[in-house]
Amino acid sequence: MYFVSWVTHIDNHVLLERNLMAEQFSHLPPLESPYGLSDEQVKKYQTEGHIMLRGLASPEEVAAYRPYIRSVLEEVTERKAKQGRPGGYASFFAQVTNVWRLHDAALRFVIARRFARVAAELMTAPGVRLYHDQALFKPAGGKATPWHQDQVYWPLDTPRTITMWMPLIDLTREMGTMVFAAGSHREGPLTQLAISDASDAFFDRLVRDRGFSLQSYDLKAGDATFHAGWTAHATHPNSSGSVREVMTIIYYADGARIVEPDNEYRRVDMEAFHPGQRPGEPAASALNPLLYSKVG
Ligand SMILES: O=C(O)CCC(=O)C(=O)O
């Protein structure tokens, strides 16, 4: 059975309970074949805390999934669904979290073995689990996303965390691409500030004072950047007349444990993304399927 074999790398009953047999989505590309990372790319990621990969998905593969991801975003933002985190980021982007739970087509994209394998190989982790996904659509005229470090939000005991950031359409800098402070991940936590004007001012000064090289890329649909949880990053504003359509998937190394939340963001994330779990436990709730395992 095609769909059953397609999901055998998933060890979690939650996904298997989903209607993966749905004929409706059988035309969607499986996104299974390996990308073929080089040792140089892995080394570059580990040195700089981010990397840009051309053609991780083909334009055709992305085009097949795009309408489903867009439809979820449009539906959720229309009814202004509240999703977990405190704080309002509406001027930066329209945000829908865990799209994989809202649509079976998006599920196939988010659990894609090709993407998860790249995440594992960049972190030299034997396996990765899903933390969550986010569709991040920056509206035309949307402000720059302020400088921040993601892991301020994440109650995990490992630096081996990573975000795949993939545009669904071709992007130029004017549409709000990412800016990374290369090598900043090696500093670990630099502040407890969450995304805000304050974090933006803090990092703006810090990257200048420390002389971090700032790197940014124009991307075609299906190209992707990956960045580590402690890599300081921001985006350009969207000064174009078009919506910037991006899908992100966040992974962590299998075996990571939940830490006692030391801020409100981490407490909320623990409850939202590791439901029923306690600090000290391996982070492996029903919402964190193992998406790739070298031995599996
Ligand atoms: O897409 C954006 O505007 C920000 C994304 C971001 O900060 C992230 O994915 O970590």
Image (cartoon, rainbow, N blue to C red):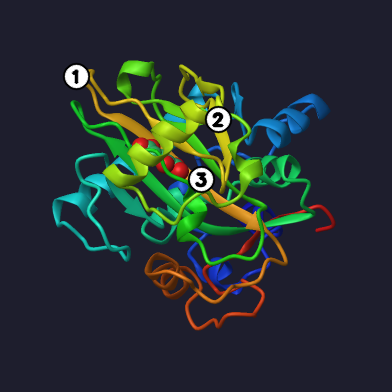
Identity of the residue drawn at 23% across and 63% down: 82
Q: Looking at this rendering, what residue extends furthest in the front direction? A: 209
Q: Which mark is residue 109?
A: 3
- The residue nearer to you, when weighing 240 against 204, is 204
How far, Cα to Cα, is label 2 from label 1?
35 Å
The residue that label 1 is drawn on is 241
First in sequence, mark 2 or 3: give its number: 3
Give the image location of residue 103, x and y in percent. Answer: 38, 55
Give the image location of residue 270, x and y in percent. Answer: 47, 72
Q: Is residue 54 left or right of residue 241?
A: right
Q: The C terminus appears in which quarter of the rendering?
A: bottom right
- The residue nearer to you, when weighing 258 against 294, is 258
Q: Is residue 85 left or right of residue 79?
A: right
> How many other residues sit within 10 Å of disc 3, few (<14), some (14-19) or many (≥20)?
many
First in sequence, mark 2 or 1: give its number: 2
Give the image location of residue 183, x and y in percent. Answer: 63, 33
First in sequence, mark 3 or 1: give its number: 3
Quadrant in the picture for residue 13: bottom right
Q: Identity of the amino acid at label 1?
A: Gly
Which SS class for mark 1? loop
Q: Which mark is residue 210?
A: 2
Q: Which mark is residue 207?
A: none
Which SS class for mark 2? helix
Residue 36 seen by the camera: no
Identity of the residue drawn at 55% across and 41% down: 231
